Amino acid sequence: MSEFSIPLSEPTLQGNEWKYVKECIDGEWVSSAGKYVNLFEQKIAEYTGAKFAIACVNGTSALQVSLRLAGVRSGDEVIVPTLSFIAPINAIAYNGASPVFMDADEYYNIDIMKTIDFIQNQTYFKDNATYNKITNKRISAIIPVHIWGNAVWLDKLVPLCREYNISVVEDASESL
């Protein structure tokens, strides 16, 4: 490896992994419940400052549930970046909605300025909902994806989404 390389997704193992895996297997809690799932949820909530955290089987299912809880319905549209893992697109499809793709910025995240321009100029607001002027479909959510640990610039996006009643569902699976 070059001295200038930045490893991507390099595991960090501290030495207790076999002990914890054995404890899970011996206790027959290897799936969706048990001591370590509860501990993981507690530690993630503490780390992120969230009131609660719920472990899901993968990022796709977490996004699917989050979109459903955010009010995404069949026939809606959800704004997503052009550069992402397939999980956000699959989660949108599993909810019966369609993606609206936004360009990436120089950091490979969703281009906030183009997204703001789209919301302000290519949509209309009616009956407390935002609609795409071209498709006339409701835009119910946006999924900013924090690509490769690069934080999306949300300071201007979140207040605008509140104003337009568009839910923000962050995909932080690459940045946590």
Image (tube, rainbow, N blue to C red):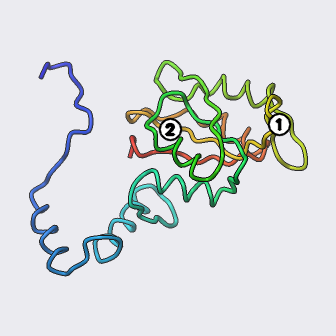
| Amino acid of disc 2 | Val
Lateral position of residue 86 relative to residue 18, left or right: right
Residue furthest bottom in the image: 27
For disc 1, the neighbor class at 10 Å (few under 14, some 14 to 19, many from 20) is few
Q: Would you identify the image quadrant in which residue 154 lies? A: top right
- Of the pair 158 and 66, the residue shown nearer to us: 66
Q: Give above or below for 158 relative to 116.
A: below
Lateral position of residue 69 relative to residue 10, left or right: right
Q: Which residue is mark 2?
A: 145
- Give SS at disc 1: loop
Q: Would you identify the image quadrant in which residue 120 lies? A: top right
| Earlier-in-chain disc, 2 versus 1 | 1
Task: Tell me which residue sits at (10%, 64%) in the image.
Answer: 18
What is the number of the mark on residue 136?
1
Q: Give above or below for 33 relative to 6.
A: below
Quadrant including the N terminus: top left
Residue 38: x and y in percent read: 35, 73
Q: Give above or below for 34 relative to 163.
A: below
| Amino acid of disc 1 | Asn
> Cα distance, mark 2 to mark 1?
25 Å
Residue 27: x and y in percent read: 19, 81
